[in-house]
Image (cartoon, rainbow, N blue to C red):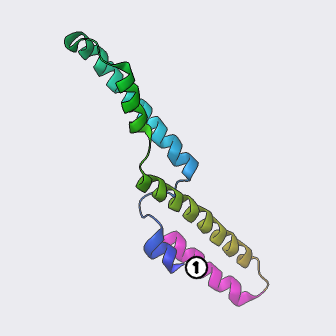
Amino acid sequence: KDLFLAVLLPKARKLVSFKERLNLHYATWKKKKKSSSIRRKKNKGKEGAQSSNADDEADATEFSPTKEELAFWLFEDQLKVRYGQFLEQLRRALHDTQEYVKKSTLGYCHDLLVG
C-alpha cells in the first residue's frame, strides 16, 4: 500500500493502459499532421514543389514513439494491472470472516482513497 501511494502511483492523473496510451499518441499525432499539412499547403505555393516522400517519412518518424516512451507506457500498463490485482485482493479481504482482517483492510482502503 505504501509503495503504491508514495512512489508508484501518479498524484494528479489516472493510470493509462498501453492501448489507451497508443491511441492518445495516435490522436495527438493525427492532429499535428493535420495542422502541419494545412501549413504545408499554404507554404507550397511560396516554396515550390516539395518531395512528398520526404514528408511521408517525416510523418512516420513523428508517429513512432521513442524507446523510452514505449518502456514508460509498458511499465505504466503493468503497474495498472498489478494495482488492479491489489485492489481485487483488498475487495476479497473485505468479505473475510475475521473481524480484524476486515478492520485492517478498511484502514488500507481509507488510506488509498484519502492518499
Total number of numbered labels? Answer: 1
Q: Residue at x 56, y 58 (%)?
A: 77
Q: Most extreme residue toward the left, as rendered?
A: 46
Q: Please say if 114 is above or below 70.
A: below
In the rendered image, which quarter is residue 57 located in? top left
Q: Please say if 102 is above or below 50.
A: below
Label 1 crowding class (10 Å Cα cut-off): few <14, some 14-19, many 20+?
Answer: some
Secondary structure under tag 1 reads helix
Question: Is residue 64 in view?
Answer: yes
Badge 1 amino acid:
Tyr
Q: Residue at x 45, y 57 (%)?
A: 13
From the top left corner, tell me how far across and down residue 35 is, in percent. 34, 25
Q: Residue at x 48, y 67 (%)?
A: 9
Q: Most extreme residue toward the right, as rendered?
A: 97
Q: Residue at x 59, y 75 (%)?
A: 109
Residue placed most toward the observer, 106 or 83: 83
Residue placed most toward the observer, 59 or 112: 59
**Which span is picked out in magenta?**
98-115
Residue placed most toward the observer, 111 or 69: 69
Look at mark 1 in the image and give the residue it sits on: 108
From the top left corner, tell me how far across and down residue 70 is, in percent. 47, 53
Position of the N terminus by quadrant: bottom right
In the rendered image, which quarter is residue 107 located in? bottom right
From the top left corner, tell me how far across and down residue 23 is, in percent. 52, 41
Does the segment drawn in magenta span residue 7?
no
In the rendered image, which quarter is residue 60 located in? top left
